[in-house]
Amino acid sequence: MICYLCKDRIGEGEPFYNDYEQYICKPCFADAPRCWICRFPGKALQEVEGLGHECEFCRGNLIDGETDLTPLVEPLRAYLKPFGLKIPATPLYQRAGWRALRDLQTDADLPPPEFIDDYLRYAYPLYWHDGALHLLHRMTKATFVPYAVVQFAAGDIASAHALPNLGGNSPFHTFARGWAHWLGHQAAQLLGYDLERRQLRKWPELGLMGEFERWERMARLNKPAKMVVYFQAHLKQLAAKHLFEPITPPRG
């Protein structure tokens, strides 16, 4: 085997990394800059503003600002409809770097991400805020689709309650966030996006996934239709208790 980067021969029994039908020797893999998306240490890396390096294999195969998102979003409407959720007829999209997008979701002091999975540990790559879907400049289709389910669901719930997002910490917010996160996890599972399913199973941290485990447990014993009825009824109760201040009648 010949190293893709340094062109030296990789001896029998020596450790190596391989992807894209290419082999990388251990010294090159340890020292070379690597792609933000796939971690491959390409030899034609380019810097993407607000993200990181992008390799020659990812370049041109990612969703970016030039991609028409309509063919990806339209099937999500049919998926969310049985759950009583809607996607705006003409969604608004705002591209963002990782820092701006993470700042919308948390003010925690966190280390800068080197790769996208470092970022996903603490924040979503898409986030509904103030009537628009904010998203990273570039990502794979497999990343976009299930995370779009999460955030379109969150956006519909937030908009119905005159909220900019579901970022609060009340029981209403954590209950609704968990439901939206569970819907995205289910979408990843149905589509066979195993990496994204596993990521959604454990991330983001810092409580951003809300009461996700509640819905996982419930799904083991209940059909989705029954869960929808429970969600809608319980959400209404939580909204009345935690979102709306009681009106105090005037004295006299």
Image: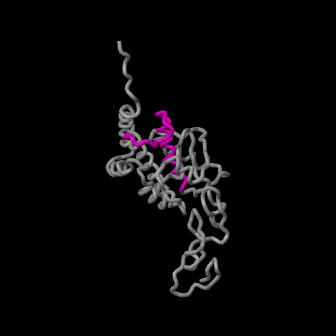
Q: Which residue, as the protein is rendered here, is positioned at the far front?
A: 109
Report which quarter residue 19 is drawn in. Answer: bottom right
Prevailing SS of the magenta stretch: helix
Please state the total of marks drawn on the protein image: 0
Start and end of the magenta stretch? Answer: 143-171
Q: Which residue, as the protein is rendered here, is positioned at the far top?
A: 252
Horizontal and vertical percent for residue 202? 41, 57
Report which quarter residue 3 is drawn in. Answer: bottom right
Q: Quadrant of the C terminus?
A: top left
Horizontal and vertical percent for residue 195? 48, 61
Q: Is residue 13 above or below residue 175?
A: below
Q: Residue 35 lies in magenta, yes or no? A: no
107 sits to left or right of 229:
right
Horizontal and vertical percent for residue 236? 38, 34
Q: Is residue 14 above or below residue 147?
A: below
Out of 167 and 131, give the one closest to the viewer: 167
Out of 81 and 25, give the one closest to the viewer: 25
Q: Is residue 74 above or below residue 28?
A: above
Horizontal and vertical percent for residue 4? 63, 77
Q: Residue 150 lies in magenta, yes or no? A: yes
